[in-house]
Amino acid sequence: MRKKKKGLGLQTTQIIALGFVILILTGTILLMLPISTVERTVTPAIDALFTATTSSCVTGLVTVVTGQHWSLFGQLVILMMIQLGGLGVVSFTTVLLMIAGQRIHLKQRMLIQEAYGFDTLKGMVRMVRKMLKGTLIVEGIGALFYMFVCIPRFGLLRGIWVSVFTSVSAFCNAGMDLFGDNSLMDYVGHPLINIVTMALIVIGGLGFVVWWDVLAMIRRVRREKMGIGMSVRRMSLHSKLVLTVTGCLIVGGALIIFALEHNNPGTMGHLTTGQKIWASIFQSVTLRTAGFASINQGALRTGSVLLGCVFMFIGGSPGGTAGGVKTVTVTLLAVAVISMVQSREDVEMGRRRIPMDTVLKGACIILIQAMFLLISIFALSCIESDMYLIDIMYEVFSALGTVGLTRGVTPAFSLAGKLVLIASMYFGRLGPITMALVMNVKAGKKKIHRQLPEGKIFV
């Protein structure tokens, strides 16, 4: 109480938001140093700030080509910001405290719990260790596979570095690469690059809770000789929902993209049938917060652009490295609408009743995100009046969904336009998470129990 009176107490959301601000400002200062660029010159403050924000918020929109403008030191700074931003400032702070031999107190444990949505305080530190260990293992395996392609192209040392950078970027859903200004377009039909990149994107976007659930299912099948069907039924409702929705979005998106773009000469028209299939699946995966591009985004047809905006709005799943309003949130609201149409008293999913406060949180997240989208699009439409609206929409959806795909207009934005995009990337990384945590803060706050007379309104 004494700390709160002095104004020293910080809520979870304030700590997370402040952590990202410190990370962005630190990265901006480091990227402005001459040593950070290939030409040993000072990068303009707006470009350094933009790069630091897009790295820390694991977005991927860039105003300068990452592999050509930044030196090895600058690329290392970007990689560290991607890793910190992808896993979260809370996790890395906890890891640093453990390395320093500091005890993780109850306050830090509660911070981890709220940041990742865990339902218990038990085993928080062990969970963070498992998250970091799992992340390094997955990124390491991804880097090893990339080396089969990168070392022959770039040489031994450069090939290893490009492989590590790409693996971390893909797992954290950042979408930044060192291949040049064409992203992964040169590898549109390369099976290894496609499979490894998509696997890293999906694994990173599933969420750590789903990881442990899937591993537990595999252990039940191998050690307890349990049937796959029975083992899947014992998974949590959350994990089953995440895996089902993710699979449906990937397959459905790929089919729609193939139908719309297979004869488009600007994207897939010149590719073989096999390459078209790879490109369609990759586009469906990368749209939901990864940001790598294997086809020209500027040549997409209008239907594909609108589909991309929807996918970027949805994003990945809770507790992972992806952005967006999350797959579970959108599904929950869709089920709530169906329940209302069917005149059910409760929202039911998987033979379980979903608490109404969870439904309301989901509705608030989607509404807030939609409001910020409209504000950002309107602001950029006024600032960049010479740009096409569809290009501005794609850019804003990409920034707010922390995706990183662009129709090639990012460097053309004015100073004011870049500041709007920076704000969108920051809000996109913190917005839905922060608002959910704000509504979940219980410490020190009592619920107001009152019931007023009903008022009649028409909707």
Image: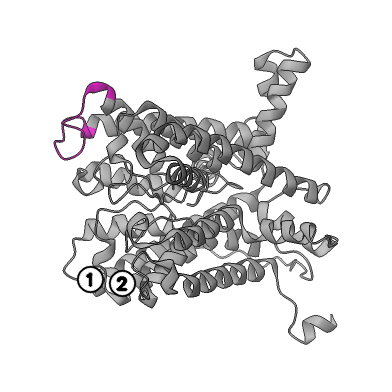
Measure how far apart labels 1 and 2 are at the Cα level.
7 Å
Report the amino acid beneath label 1: Glu
The residue indicated by pointer 1 is: 384
Q: Which of 129 and 160 is in front in this view?
A: 160
Q: In the rendering, at what x and y percent does residue 109 appear? A: 79, 58
Place residue 410 in its image quadrant. bottom left
Q: Name the disc covering residue 260, or none.
A: none
Residue 120, compared with residue 64, is above or below; it is above
280 sits to left or right of 137: left
Magenta segment, prevailing SS (helix, strand or loop): loop
Residue 189, compared with residue 52, is above or below; it is above
105 sits to left or right of 274: right
Q: Please give the range of residues in magenta.
A: 260-274
Residue at point 51%, 56% (across, down): 79
Q: Which of 184 and 70 is in front in this view?
A: 70
The residue at the far bottom in this view is 6
Q: Which corner quadrant holds the N terminus?
A: bottom right
Callout 2 crowding tier (Cα within 10 Å): few <14, some 14–19, many ≥20: some
Residue at point 35%, 38% (across, down): 153
| Upstream in sequence: badge 1 or badge 2 | 1
Residue 188, compared with residue 400, is above or below; it is above
Report the amino acid beneath label 2: Gly
Q: In the rendering, at what x and y percent does residue 40 appear? A: 37, 71
Q: Name the disc covering residue 417, or none.
A: 2
Question: Can residue 424 be seen in this snapshot?
Answer: no
